[in-house]
Image: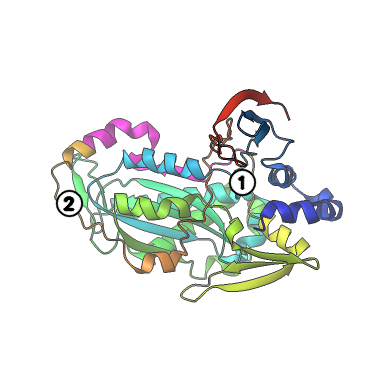
Amino acid sequence: MLELADIVKEYGRTYRAKYGDRMLPSHWGALWDIEHCRTSLMSGDLFWCDACQTYIYSYHSCGNRHCPKCGGDRADAWRDRQMEKLLPVPYFLVTCTLPHTLNAVARSNQKLIYDLLFQASAEALQTLALNPKWVGGKIGMVGALHTWDRAMGYHVHAHYLAPAGGIDPATGEWRPSHPKFLVPASALRKLFRAKFRDALKAADPELFAQVPVKTWSKNWVVHCKPVGNGETALKYLTPYMYRVALSNSRLVKMENGKVTFRYKPRNASWRTMTLDAMTFLHRFLQHVLPKKFHKVRYRGFLHPSAGKSLAALQDQLAEAAPTPDQLPESLASTFGIEITTVSAKDDEPLSEPLQELPIRCPHCGGPLTYIGQIPP
């Protein structure tokens, strides 16, 4: 099966020679890691099969969060941690998107713009939720950054998974939201736009001046959809929250300097797109995040520092009636979720191999004896 590593091995050197003087260190690192993942240039483990008298080498994963082969186990571990924080209430998925008129500024100033996206969208959500007309309480949110659309184009947006309600700041009691919406989308898009505008102007006036004026008058895109109860939402959304821009299963072929991959437009069947290899690598690399940038963030009573508040809230809602656990049928098609093909990566760099160590010989099926670690 064709893998991203094969494409990088074939065309990575040419790409680096052509664009190396303009590549970010994170792009250099991602290409090297992906190309050498689970090869002899990584450290590994050595096994011996007594049945067929064969040494078996198991090389470690690169651990780069943008590698399609790495991190699947981390998604499950993250989901298990979030399961412990669930409330017995419905949940919403809120999406806040930056307009494409900000793309040029965002590409060149990733850390600042992505940070401001999180800041402005979370503050806008929290401000509206505090209004007694909507929730009247402080909400909790788990947010994830995505920078791609379905065809790997540049499309910067943040997703938030939020319980349907908040904590009354005066009484500490739970205040449920409307069952069909958390906050009104029309108000959210205006406040999100205003907060982002003001934050960018305050952070970097010169950069703010580079943004087309029409950006601040056009409608920004936000969505707020119910996604069932928390357990169901996490089951379906964890891979989506953590996936990388392109999974190996979507690669179709590589030939004559071109790469073909599959993508699924909204509310349509799967299609294929063919790009020349340099354009393909550029599309992929524009989604490589700055080093140590946290793409998953927590707000309100779901923040790690709010453990006592969350525990008290869980106790308060423990006797609540169970909520329906059916995920809306439109969710998978709306957000393009691919449950079985998604790779994941936690926020922090990995320090241990990700793949399971082999327990049976791949040649004869016999038991293996562990010999020891091997250096790169």
Residue 374 in sight from this viewpoint: yes
Magenta segment includes 262: no
- Along the viewing direction, whichever of 120 and 82 lies nearer the viewer: 82
Residue at coordinates 67% horizontally, 31% vertically from top-left? 53
Task: Name the kind of residue labelled 1 in the image.
Answer: Lys
Task: Name the kind of residue labelled 2 in the image.
Answer: Pro
- Along the viewing direction, whichever of 310 and 333 lies nearer the viewer: 333
Residue 183: % across, % down: 32, 60
Quadrant in the picture for residue 181: bottom left
Residue at coordinates 84% horizontally, 49% vertically from top-left? 21
Packing grade of label 2 (10 A; few <14, some 14-19, many >=20) is few
**Secondary structure state at the residue bearing disc 1:** helix
Residue 89: % across, % down: 23, 51
Q: Which residue is mark 2?
A: 322
**Secondary structure state at the residue bearing disc 2:** loop
Q: The N terminus appears in which quarter of the rendering?
A: bottom right
**Vertical side of 149 occupied by 314: above or below:** above
Quadrant in the picture for residue 260: bottom right
Residue furthest to the right = 17
Residue 246 in sight from this viewpoint: no
Q: Which residue is mark 1?
A: 111
Query: Is 149 left, or right, of 234 in this rendering?
Result: right
Query: Is 75 left, or right, of 151 in this rendering?
Result: left
Residue 155: % across, % down: 57, 62
